[in-house]
Amino acid sequence: MGNEKKNRRTALLFGGVVVAMFGFGFAIAPLYSLYCKLTGVQSVSNTSSTGESSVKADGAGAVNRLVTVKFDANVTNGLPWEFKPLVRKLVVRLGEDVEAKFTAHNLAHETIVGQAIPNVVPWQATQYFNKTECFCFREQALQAGESREMTVRFLVSPNLPEGINSLTLSYTFMNRDVQSAKKFEQISAHPEKKQTVQPESAITTGQSS
Amino acid sequence: MMLLGLAGFTQAEYGINFPEPVTPSARDIYHIHMLTMTIAAVLLVIVFGIVSYSLYTHRKSRGYVPDQNMHKGWFGRWSWVVIPVLVLGVDMTIAGSAEKVLERLWLVPKDKDMMEVKVTGHQWWWEYEYLDQEVKVESRFVPQEKAGDLYLLEVDNPLVLPTNTKIRFLHTSADVNHSFWVPQLGFKKDAIAGYITETWAVIDKDKEGVYRGQCAELCGTWHARMPIVVQAVSPEKFTAWVAEQKTRIAAAAAEASSGKVWSKDDLMEKGRNLYNKNCAACHQLDGKGLPPAFPPLVAGAAFSAAENMSKPLEERGFLKDGKIVLGPVPKHVDIVLNGIPGTTMQAWKQLDNLEIAAIVTYERNAFNNNTGDVVQFADIEKARGANAAAAAR
Amino acid sequence: MSIATIAPGHESEHRGTPQGWRRWLFSTNHKDIGTLYLVVSLIMLFLGGAMSMLIRAELFMPGIQLLEPDFFNNLVTNHALILVFGAVMPAAAGMGNWMIPMMIGAPDMALPRMNNMSFWFLVAAAVMLVVSMTVPFLPGGGTMVNTGWTLYPPLSVQVGMSMDFLIFTVHLLGISSILASINIIVTILNCRAPGMTLMKMPIFCWSWLITAFLLILIMPPFAGGVTMLLFDRHFGTSFFNAAGGGDPVLFQHLFWFFGHPEVYVLLLPSMGILAHIIPTFSRKPLFGYHSTVGAMVAVGAMGMLVWAHHQYTIGMSLAAVTYFMIATILISIPVGLMVFNYIATMWRGAMTFETPMLFAVGIILMFSFGGLTGVMLATVPGDIQYHDSYFVVAHFHYALIAGALLGLYAGTFFWLPKWTGHMYDEKLGKIFFWMVIIGHNLTFFPQHFLGLAGMPRRVVDYNVMFTEFNMISSIGAFIFGASHLLFLYIIVKTVRGGAKPSEKVWEGASGLEWTLPSPPPFHTFTTPPAIK
């Protein structure tokens, strides 16, 4: 019957679609990288990119515009580290090479591997913030009780839009190992928990809003 | 009829129930809300009206004869254009007004050196860090007994903010998704671990006061009990408050390193706090531990574990005949200060002497242990000295 | 393929109507499978409804009286999953199975054995869901699912084994829905009686056709998302974990890309049912058949493009948030057109108010209300206050209960006489209707105010300032819940016996299904009918 040929063609077509889907699944990774490169779209946690590739990291493009850069450090539950910036605030010149330091201290009794995730506020400034060297580019392992200084080298592009005058670079250190994180997660709230003692204060919390 | 009445009731009540806005953003939002609500109410009245009329008039019981040719009239032929155009008109009105407000709300001002406050959501409390002033505040709920009618809307340490100052907020989380919501300030932003989201606000100059909010993203067991309290004060009072906080932090540090002798009750209270925060994860809030991994701290409790755990405990005098014993105080201090190498009991050297003294005192007296032992700051200092001497050798 | 080729030879495969448990386990009959779906959905309705009663009982007064917070969060989660996936969707599938072949003059669904499989996969999913709920109560069972039906990580990564069973439930539900949807599409496109063009096809069939396409499009991303969650939980991946370069928000997008069209999946079949009930009881054909079809297609298509309006507070850019706001607001156009067409059908008709029509009118009024609060929610500035508050809860319960659930109740009363051959008790039906209306409005209307006053959703306890409206809401809920006992009674009574319906059943009814006897024989339209 005439249908047999048509049915065979349909089956082949659908089979081809399935194969194409699988292929697409594998091709997604390189296609996605290509898309990011072409459009310049950056993931916020893009640890290995350096923002605008056209800006040279030799201070040659330094302009006479100053912006404030603040530094912030966070640690998520599950990472028993102390992590803080060594310097809170810098006034930097656009296009100028700058170095900032953080320290991290492993409080636990075993080696822990952490990954720092950078964020820039305001988010529009992210693509103008070029990190030439950063501890966030790779995992950081700290031995039990180890303290380490961590450096980030960056420059803020001279193309930074006019309205932005203050940036905050914030890192969040997270435990790279899920099992390790589970172990160190603290139960920090329970019905019986007493709150911290409130000292005498000139400002009293009113009883009405 | 009831529904029509409810529509009228709606109109009045809505206006009353949105709490008073105290920032320009919140005011903008309030106006958009009133616009959309009014449009919705008007449309509702129209629809209800038409349907009610039809229900009454176009009934078989009233002898109405169905009009089988309605689709042939002008409206019948063109209503499929007219109605969408009318709805589109309403939509564009709403969208246009909303769009203008949206830009103002969304675009965080980029003033030079704006005051920045970092808001971190934890399970189940908030942490506020004033990035410029370097002051950290931990904000937890106040239990029912103390908070009374403000339970679930009251915290121990509020977020103090200056009025008439543009503030940029950075939101993040230390664990799961939370959301920071203070209705009167007019913003809500999700807190996502590893990422920073931004909002901004400026509280009206004449609106000093207390504003309350809650966590707005289901974050686990006590999502309902993570209140937010903002205390807005004049910029001068705010500066004074910051100075006070810094003094307090310095004083606490000084006190911790002073040689003052503490009463057992004070040590127990401080110890309980610290124990719950640092030790309870493994040894549990009731001290029963999680054998065989984490031993109980209750004298007389049965405990058996692998040799790498039981041997060090026996050596230090804390395990005998398969039962937990409260060994000598110096050994207890040693376990807390230096940990037990080869096990998951870590060193707690980073806590200051007063904190370790409090924890050990608490552990020896809580859970019905009641040894009566009191450990002082000086004891810990001596233990650290012994450590250093041993390390130097 | 000609219709006639399905039927011959079939009679020889079984002598007369199958009997006993084999009839139901191995059924390939669209009427029986329809009945099976309806029975399962009724059971799930009570299970999910009981959970709602527990939730509202706890929220009756401030303070935690009855339920542990985690169990409360678990009830909130499961109440939604059971009612959405176990009650509404299967009931719509049941009605689709019963009515679509009869409406298009086909002897059965195009793929009867796959039809059977779709049903039993649903039962397997229900069993898996019950396992997920039970596991935490067994030793070593881990924590309960306390994330809400949205299952957001990182919280859902923290949950115990229960979550994994829930993920498998979702997989099974997806398979069931996708197979059923394929069946419906093939049936509608291939098995219509000769002369029934697509534009002559009853609206209920159109609504299911669109729903079926939506399901096929949205179930795979949802299944993908929960599978990624499974991998993050157990196999060391970091899809939703920033530590490994992932983002919790990715899950949200995957979920809502499914979640928003899902509400149209819930809504459209019920709207399709209304398109039959209103003309019947207005004694006037549906006003604007073509524009209703167009509106439903538009709703389905546009509904695929607006998912992030559930995520306005995650920190999207201004451009993104603006797009989603405008696109969402525009959906009011086809929805408004659909509702207008229904009102225009009533207009200048000669209405009588049997129970199905009572429900239809109630639906039009209350669904419009829900739709209007939806437009309020669509505006981003407003949503900054409404999001994750009781205002949203109120909105979607109006939209879902009035739009989806009551449509199914209306369909039940409308078609029970056809299915059973007995008229239901009209007086009881009317009492049920009024109890539902009063209960529903008492429950959910006050919740708008709670949201505006600042009460967040998914909370086990609340500040005393929210007490009064919560009490009213809970009382309404108990009325609403109790009314369903009456519903069950009415259904059982009708199945057992009742007055014999007239040949047409309803005076204004039209369509192929009404030309069949009540109840229809095991096989109908074994030869295709003539379409004028």
Image (cartoon, rainbow, N blue to C red):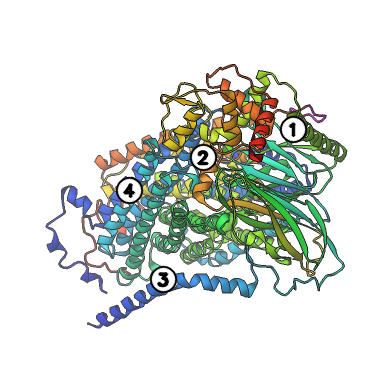
Q: Main secondary structure of the magenta part?
A: loop
Q: Is residue C349 magenta?
A: no
Q: Are marks 2 and 4 on the same chain?
A: no
A81 on left or right of C41: right
* Residue positioned 22% across, 51% down in the render: C25
Q: Relative to the observer, which residue lies in front, B319 or A187?
A: B319
In space, the residues marked 2 and 4 are separated at their CA atoms by 56 Å
Tell which tag, 1 or 2, sits nearer the viewer: 2
| Residue neighbourhood size for the residue with mark 1, other residues' Cα within 10 Å, grouped as few (<14), some (14–19), many (≥20) | few
Residue with the mark numbered 3: A22
Q: Chain of mark 1?
A: A
- The quarter of the image holding the C terminus of chain B is top right
Q: What's the residue type where badge 2 is placed? A: Thr
Please state the extent of the stretch shown in magenta in the rendering: A200-208
Tell which tag, 3 or 2, sits nearer the viewer: 2
> Does residue A3 show up?
yes
> Does residue B16 show up?
no
Q: Relative to the observer, which residue lies in front, A172 or B8?
A: A172
Residue with the mark numbered 4: C38
Q: Chain of mark 4?
A: C
Residue C463 in which image quadrant: top right
Q: Relative to the observer, which residue lies in front, C154 or A110?
A: A110
